[in-house]
Amino acid sequence: MIDINKTYRTRDGRQVRIYSTDGGGIYPIHGAILDKVLPGWFLATWDINGYSLRGNKEFADLIEVKPRIKRTVWLNIYKGEGHPTTKEEADRQAAKTRIACIKVEIDCEEGHGL
């Protein structure tokens, strides 16, 4: 169900503003889509699940925009695993059985891959 306190975009990546989630009828979600071709905000409506009124075209369906996670971690590699956030911390936590220490850059939406 669409929540007015969350941020959304369209399936094809356009910015969305949600004005109301209690409009009634089949398409109670009211808002606007920022058009890139004809610059400006255009009125739009969606059902309670964020599906667009625009027929079978899914390009205007709503997708929740989740916060991004960006961080660097260092992984000690052995038969187990660790997750220090600096190379120095990885070296301090390393056991004699460590076979490698690799740097991993994480840049993904919250919840991605769960």
Image (spheres, rainbow, N blue to C red):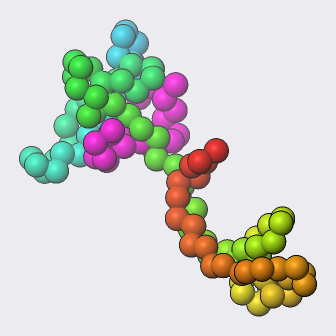
Residues in magenta, as a range: 1-23
In the rendered image, the vertical position of residue 16 relative to residue 89, given as above or below: above
Q: Position of residue 32 (x, y in %)?
A: 28, 37
Query: Which SS does the magenta portion mostly show?
Result: loop
Name the foreground residue: 94 vs 29: 94
Name the foreground residue: 62 vs 5: 62
Q: Is there any visible trace of residue 93 in the rendered image?
A: no
Q: How many marks?
A: 0
Query: Extreme top residue here?
Result: 25
The residue at the point 57 percent across, 67 percent down is 106
Q: Where is residue 98, by image quadrant?
A: bottom right
Q: Is residue 100 left or right of residue 71?
A: right
Does residue 13 show up magenta in the picture?
yes
Query: Extreme left residue here?
Result: 38
Q: Position of residue 40 (x, y in %)?
A: 16, 47
The residue at the point 38 percent across, 34 percent down is 62
Q: Where is residue 83, by image quadrant?
A: bottom right
The residue at the point 84 percent across, 65 percent down is 80
Name the foreground residue: 45 vs 85: 85
Name the foreground residue: 26 vs 95: 95
Q: Is residue 71 left or right of residue 4?
A: right
Does residue 14 show up magenta in the picture?
yes
Q: Is there any visible trace of residue 101 in the rendered image?
A: yes
The residue at the point 71 percent across, 81 percent down is 101
Q: Is residue 30 left or right of residue 38?
A: right
Q: Position of residue 97 (x, y in %)?
A: 88, 79
Q: Position of residue 34 (x, y in %)?
A: 23, 46
In the rendered image, the vertical position of residue 37 relative to residue 95, given as above or below: above
Query: Extreme right residue here?
Result: 96
